[in-house]
Amino acid sequence: METKIISVVGEKGGIGKTTLNIILASDLFYAKGKKVVLLDADNPQYSIYNKRERELESLDEEERQSMELYPIEPVTVANLQDAITKHYGLVDYIILDLPGSLNVEMVKGLLYVEHVFVPFDHDELEIDSTSHFYFTLKNNFLDNDERILKSIHLFFNKYKLVKKNKFAVLRQQFLNADIPMMKSVVKDKTIYKERYRNTLYPIPDHKELGSKDIKHFFEEVAQLTQ
């Protein structure tokens, strides 16, 4: 089995990377039938691993026993390679949730990622930091003869339809600078955090089917990692 190692990642917290890693993992496993493992490397919080534990506690024993779940494992830089080796070739996707800052843990974690997806908002400071983060990744991980990283893709998170013209201009500026932008976006919707950020269930089949809804983002991720 060909395993892809992917991560939604950014150099600062609050950009929605953990939410998107969870929703993406749940969609790939529950809705697409892919074999998935999610490695939580955000030490020491381990917010995804702890969230799964809380979600399981809300179920009765019979429900817990009957559910088929994708594994969520807390990892550290020290044992990350062992965790990846354990699952590599046995699953379709290893999704790695990294710390929300460009520190030693993130840099070491990125050594194992094949496809990176970088969310950012239409904010002047965030635009500057995201473009700098992209070129840091490109120069240090992508343009490297011994690279593991195969691709970097930027996308708009917290996208607002009322600012679609501003987002369109920014997209073109990034494309003109040879920075790859995804066609799909992730809209600014509280439901992603409040309801759909769930490790036990996917987004319902009849939801999020609009032209700029999140299921198009899922489809593009799957295409870009083939």
Image: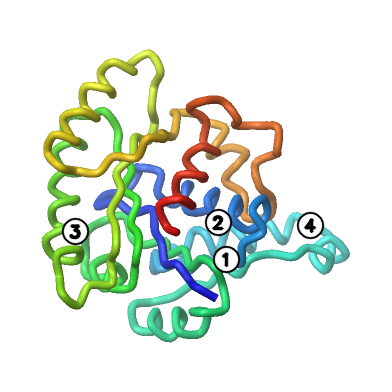
The local crowd at label 3, few if under 14, some if 14 to 19, many if 20 or more residues have their Cα within 10 Å, is some
The amino acid sitting under disc 2 is: Ala
Callout 3 touching callout 2 (CB < 8 Å)? no
Which residue bears the numbered disc 2? 25
- According to the image, label 1 marks what residue? 36
Q: Are marks 1 and 2 in contact (CB under 8 Å)?
A: yes
Q: Nearer the viewer, mark 4 or mark 3?
A: 3
Q: Is residue 23 left or right of residue 172?
A: right
| Residue that numbered label 3 is attached to | 137
Q: Which residue is mark 4?
A: 59
Q: Earlier in the sequence, mark 1 or mark 2?
A: 2
Element at label 4: loop
Question: Which amino acid does the dot numbered 4 rest on?
Answer: Leu
CA distance for labels 4 and 1: 22 Å
Cβ atoms at labels 4 and 3 below 8 Å apart: no
Label placed on residue 193 = none
Name the foreground residue: 126 vs 219: 219
Frontmost residue, 111 versus 17: 111
Vertical relation: 145 (above or below) 159: below
